């Protein structure tokens, strides 16, 4: 039986790592009160704090993409995290008065990555369990 390819998932995961690296660098150097992008107002400490998390996520995505089957749980975690971000972003944009629409496009990009993760994971033969529950390693 031929194993299905996870190369498209690995490539997508690595590309989303590039996207998170860009976001991390923007938060560290460009986004925040007193910086070129001030809307929504964000204290520079929190912007750097967020940026550091984006860089950590990117690092995990880059490394996971080299052995995507083994680190499929990381894909599941990013699916949950990106869905939460997308929901939170658009809920705030729709229901919070005067919430800035500065980052509307990030919701579209993150939605695209999330859909691609799901499609490529299932086409590659991964099951829901592999994405969201780590496999227990049996002692030999």
Image (spheres, helix red, strand yellow):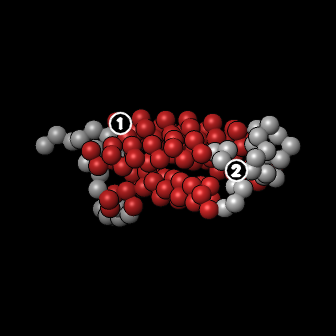
Pointer 1 residue = 8
Residue 38 in view in this figure: yes
**Is 77 left or right of 42, judged from the image as shown?**
left
Q: Quadrant of residue 73?
A: bottom left
Q: Residue at x 57, y 60 (%)?
A: 91
Where residue 137 appears, as percent x and y from the top left, is 35, 62
Tell me which label, 1 or 2, sits earlier in the chain: 1
- Of 7 and 118, which appears nearest the observer? 118
Pointer 2 residue = 100
Q: Residue at x 67, y 44 (%)?
A: 102
Q: Quadrant of the N terminus?
A: top left
- Of 48 and 104, which appears nearest the observer? 104
Residue 52 in view in this figure: no
Q: Residue at x 32, y 61 (%)?
A: 129
Where residue 20 appears, as percent x and y from the top left, is 58, 41
Dot 2: within a 10 Å radius of its alpha carbon, few (fewer than 14), some, or many (20 or more) residues?
Answer: few
Q: Quadrant of residue 99?
A: bottom right
Q: Is residue 114 above or below residue 77?
A: above
- Of 122 and 138, which appears nearest the observer? 122
Where residue 122 appears, as percent x and y from the top left, is 29, 49
Q: Residue at x 70, y 38 (%)?
A: 26
**Is 121 left or right of 114, judged from the image as shown?**
left
* CA distance for labels 1 and 2: 35 Å
Mark 1 vs mark 2: give the one in front.
Answer: 2
Where residue 46 appears, as percent x and y from the top left, is 76, 54
């Amino acid at each position: 039986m031929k194993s299905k390819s996870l190369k498209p998932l690995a490539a997508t995961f690595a590309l989303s790592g590039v996207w998170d690296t860009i976001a991390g660098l923007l938060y560290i150097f460009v986004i925040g009160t007193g910086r070129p992008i001030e809307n929504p107002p964000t204290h520079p400490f929190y912007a750097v704090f967020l940026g550091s998390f984006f860089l950590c996520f990117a690092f995990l995505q880059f490394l996971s993409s080299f052995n995507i089957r083994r680190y499929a749980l990381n894909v599941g975690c990013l699916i949950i995290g990106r869905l939460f971000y997308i929901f939170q972003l658009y809920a705030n944009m729709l229901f919070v008065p005067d919430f800035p629409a500065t980052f509307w496009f990030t919701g579209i990009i993150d939605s695209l990555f999330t859909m691609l993760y799901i499609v490529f994971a299932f086409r590659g033969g991964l099951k829901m369990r592999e994405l969201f529950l780590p496999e227990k390693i049996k002692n030999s």
